[in-house]
Every structure is written in structure tokens, then in C-alpha cells.
Image (spheres, helix red, strand yellow):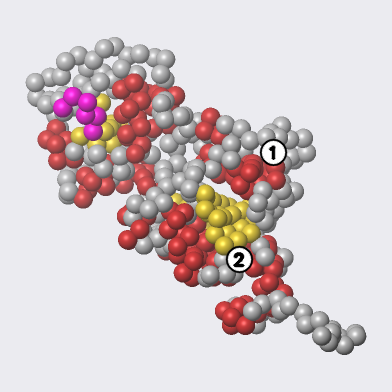
Amino acid sequence: MTGAPAGAATAARPLLTDEQMERYSRHILLREVGVQGQRRLLDSRVLVVGAGGLGSPALLYLAAAGVGTIGVVDGDRVELNNLQRQVIHTTDRVGSPKVESAARTIAALNPDVQVRTYPTVLSSQNALDIIREYDVVVNGSDNFPTRYLVNDACVLLKRPLVDASVLMWEAQMAVFMPGKGCYRCLYPTPPPPGAVPSCGDAGVMGAMVGHVGTLQALEAIKILLGLGETMDSRLLLFDALYGDYRVLRRQRNPECPVCGDHPTITELVDYEQFCGVPAPRSNVEAAVGAAATPPAPAAPRAAWERPPAGEWEIEPEEAARYLGSPEVQWIDVRQPYEYELQHIPGARLIPLPDLNDRWREIDPDRPAILVCAVGERSGLATRALRRAGYQQVYNLRGGMAAWVNLQLKTESGGPS
């Protein structure tokens, strides 16, 4: 057997296969990326928290770019109302776990990508173990407890975080690099529960969410490649309705309890408690004042037909029968700007965050119908009031969206 000639060079293993050279050719043509940059992407790991409106476009473009390992954390299943903006999912996957749906789409898009799925809710118990496996984190979550949790975990693990939030026509995005400030530097305390409506309550423009999620993917890719200037030390504010982009400078807060000079938070905490979002048992009970027990409600008056026992929601068609009735109270728990745009005639405005101080304005001896945008906030308030002793409060099923869809009577303007 004849060996290789002395001094002969061993053929080097190529950085990319022929197929990869073709697939990523438009990246490779960019002098800032090239073959070595593409190899770096293939060796990188990105975690996306949430396979929803922001996570969907971020996942698609990270996968298309050839990020070699992508983690997806989401405990939800695909719903029909997701498809208006969550473009990684399809109609035939309604009811499927979002992480499985996302993994299927990514596999079809780019077989180079390994997808790790976490069909669970990110929590203080699992966040550090999951996040430490990745180079960059993209946060597409839609609630404040998770936002603060992801921020704190990334600070503790020294991981770059690409964060964004969206509502209606507006969005914010920022990049938090280790040692250069964090989400808590911008927002030390969360807003009161119910003060900021969810996309399920207030709505959101799907194309705008896609735009912002794609920007998140771009920032993550720049971090992985060490290219250009990221949105680090800046905050992007985007108003899609008016096409207005604003970039604000931000700084690290030396007094920040997580990333400051003398941090007081050195481990993950109870983020539901921190954000004032109670466990399912109590929900908005804290906002209502569970310790205070109102007088026992009297029997319903004859004109009011109590819904069947055990029912705590009322359909819009049924509720419309009681418009103008002096026996029935209508309570709108939305924000003032929502109320001014459109509300049910005669409805009294008591925003959910104010319910703690104003619950006594609701007469326990008369039926009350609670209203919000789609029934989420009013449902929380209804359950909390019932636990506090109000047995004649009912949630308007589907909220103002269902009411308007049936072309029932509305009016505009502020409270009288």
C-alpha cells in the first residue's frame, strides 16, 4: 500500500457545501458576510421566545439566513385568530402546538437548521437552563411578566437580547447588550394590571408586526456576525399608521437593580407577583380588594331575567334587551380613550386599574353587565367581583367587538 507523498497537503474540508454555496449565495456576495460569515451563522444558536406575531417572521428570516440552531419557546396552540399575523403557521395546523408548527415550517424552508422546541411557558424555574444554551435571545412575548423574566435571565447569563413589543399600529424595539443597560433601565416598574390592553383587546396590524419581527431577526444576525451598529443603546419607536420612525438614545442606569453597579436582583424572582398579575385563583382580586365584602345582593327584580344558574356571561343579543333599563348597570372597564371612541349607551366608565378604588360605585343589589373590547378584561373583573360577593355581575361575551358586529346601538364621547 502506497502512502501519500511526504509533505503532500491534506485537502481542507470546505466551509460550505456546494448546495450551501448556492443557497446562501446572496449573503456570500456581501463583503461583510462572505463564506466565513455564513459559516459563522451556521454555527450559531438563537432562542426565540414566542412563536407568535413577532416570533413568526423572526423565525422565518433567521432560518432562511442559515442560523444553524434555533430554539422556540411557546406553550400555546395555533388558533384561527393567530393567522392574521403569525405567518409561520397555517390553517390546517389550528389546534397544533405552536412550536411544532414552527418547526415544520422551518424544516421545509431550510434543512440546514436544527430546531429545538420547548412546548412550555418560560418561567423562573426553566429560563436559565434554556437561555444559557444560546448565543442571542429574541423576545417576542406578549406579556410583562415574561418580558421582565427574559430580561433578567439575559442579564444574569450575559446574553444579548433583542426585544420588541407591538400594539395596534405602534411598536418599540431595542437591543440590550451585556453591560450596556437592560429593559429595567428603561422601565424599572411594570404598568398597573389592565392599564395596557393586550393585542387581543385592542387589536394589532399584522403587517406592522411582521415588519418589526423581521427587524429583530436582522439585529440578531448583525450581533452574531459582529457587523455594523445594532440598536444597542437606542430605542426605536415606530408608528405604522403615520409612517413615523423615531430613535431615542438610552443609557444604562447605574441604579438598576439587575444590571446596575450594585445589583440587588441576583436570581430570578416571582414575575407574576412583581408585575401584579395574580395567579389564576385570584386574578384581578387584588385590584378589586378581596378583603372588602360588600352587602349581600338582593333578589333580582322582575324585569331582569337572571341567566341560568352558574352562568356568568351574557350574550350581546340578550344584553341588548336591557339597554335603557334603570334596573341594569352597564360598566365599561376599558381605558378612557377606548370609551370615547365608542361605547354602549348608558355605560359607566370604570377602567380596570381603577376598580380597586371604585368598586363601591357598583350597586350589589342591581344586575351589572361588564364590558371591554373583546371580553377579556371584563371577564377578569367579573370573576373577581363575584369572588368578592357580587353575584349579579355578568360579562358581556365577546365585548364591544361582538356588540358592534351585530350592529347594536353605540355612541361616542367621554363620560358625562
N-terminal of the pair, mark 1 or mark 2, is: 2
Magenta stretch: dominant secondary structure = loop
Tell which of 262 and 279 is nearer to you: 279
Residue 303: x percent and y percent?
Answer: 9, 24
Q: Which residue corresponds to mark 2? A: 67
Tell which of 134 and 197 is nearer to you: 134
For residue 410, the mark is none
Q: Amino acid at mark 1?
A: Val
- Specify whether residue 221 is painted magenta: no
Q: Is residue 178 above or below residue 306?
A: below
- In this rendering, does residue 355 appear at all? yes
Tell which of 311 and 232 is nearer to you: 311
Instruction: Say which residue appears at 39% left-offset and 50% top-offset.
Output: 77
Give the spatial CA distance, label 1 vs label 2. 30 Å
Name the residue at the top extreme.
295
Name the residue at the front extreme.
1
Tell which of 81 and 115 is nearer to you: 115
Dot 1: element: loop
For residue 258, the mark is 1
Q: Foreground mark, 1 or 2?
A: 2
Residue 252: x percent and y percent?
Answer: 71, 46
Q: Is residue 396 above or below residue 67?
A: above
Q: Is residue 189 above or below residue 139?
A: above
Q: Quadrant of residue 336?
A: top left
Magenta segment range?
308-313
Dot 2: element: loop
